Amino acid sequence: MYLTGFADEAGKDIDTQIRATLELGWTDIESRNIGGANIHDIPDEQFDEVCRKLDAAGVRVNCFGSAIANWAKQITDPFDITVKEIRRTIPRMQRLGSKLIRIMSYAVLEGRGPDDQMAEERFKRLREINSMFADAGITAVHENCMNYGGMGHAYTLELVENVPGLKLVFDTGNPVFTDDRSKALPYPKQSAWEFYSNVKDHIAYVHIKDGVWDAETQEIRYTFADEGDGDVKRIVKDLLDNGYDGGISMEPHLAVVFHDESVTSDAQVQYDNYVEYGRRFMALLEEIGHADKIIGA
């Protein structure tokens, strides 16, 4: 098992992201945004500089937190948009030696029921996405976020069944604020433990996030790991008790939420929150008797 995280939640620039990673004693970053743009979209000159700084610090990018087929992309958009993103991404991953990439299954179509979501087109596209990365020696992992597969564990299992070889990144916090569209209206929120229990055989990577849903305000309040309703400790213990030895990535959302520009904070607060989140998670591992399993990636 190794620990990593979305270090852009510690700071926008790569220097701050590296500094936070090293302060935690880690060697890996799940790279998402650098200087305000996704790592697969930044200019070549900036990417070259990022590579040099990572090499000098001895820090790796273990996973690309890509925007490929994510909640901001529509299944009705031309597939060529996705293909171009993939073609930009693969050479960068190969240069960095990154073997994992987070993908999704496109946004849920508004105004349509769960059985009217162009499922076959999604399966077709994800088969091609998965194949393109596999041919390059890269593992694509699908996240249970605001997308087709995130509508409930049954929809994630549909993806696994229809996209041969597809693996999952399970996010502990996303079920807390996501409707379970496999249930009857009015949709209840999902159970992180129930979702996890049904998909755990396909998990290759984990995101740690937690929070509490406020039904009155219809908003989530993010918390430190295991202080919310994401069943973090129970899920992590079950994973490690059963031999999981992959990456566990922090995505705190305490000081900044990347799909909500209204959530911002002072740069030092962002940095301190990220580092504190990582330290508290390491204490959680100690509490459940698995701290000795932390290794380099």
Image (cartoon, rainbow, N blue to C red):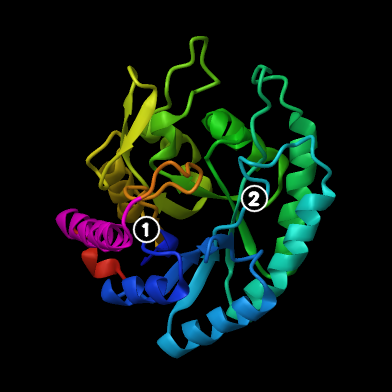
What kind of residue is marked 1?
Gly
- Residue lying furthest left: 287
Q: Is residue 19 above or below residue 52?
A: above
The magenta stretch spans residue 103: no
Q: Position of residue 132 (x, y in %)?
A: 76, 61
Residue 285 inside the magenta-drawn segment: yes
Q: Nearer the viewer, residue 103 or 164?
A: 103
Magenta residues, as a range? Answer: 265-288
Residue 271 placed where, x, y %? 30, 63
Question: At x 27% / y 63%, what residue is drawn?
Answer: 275
Q: Is 104 situated left or right of 231 in this image?
A: right
Residue plotted at (51% across, 44% down): 259
**What residue did someone put label 1 on?**
243
Q: Secondary structure at mark 1?
A: loop
Residue 246 shows up from this direction: no
Q: Position of residue 225 (x, y in %)?
A: 27, 47
Provide residue 4's location: percent of width, then percent of height: 39, 65
- The amino acid type, in three-letter code, at marker 2 is Leu
Q: In front of the other: label 1 or label 2?
A: 2
Judged from this view, the residue extending furthest toward the top is 185
User: Quarter holding the C terminus?
Assistant: bottom left
Query: Residue tagged by mark 2?
Result: 166
Q: Is residue 87 visible?
A: yes
In-image side of 27 versus 168 (left or right): left
Q: Is residue 2 left or right of residue 30?
A: left
* Number of other residues with Cα within 10 Å of mark 1, as a class: few under 14, some 14 to 19, many 20 or more: few
Quadrant housing the N terminus = bottom left
Judge the density around disc 2: few (<14), some (14-19), many (≥20) Cα neighbours within 10 Å: many
Q: Name the residue rendered at 61%, 40% in the picture.
A: 71
The mark nearer the N terminus, 1 or 2, is: 2
Question: Which label was assigned to residue 171?
Answer: none
Magenta region's main secondary structure?
Answer: helix
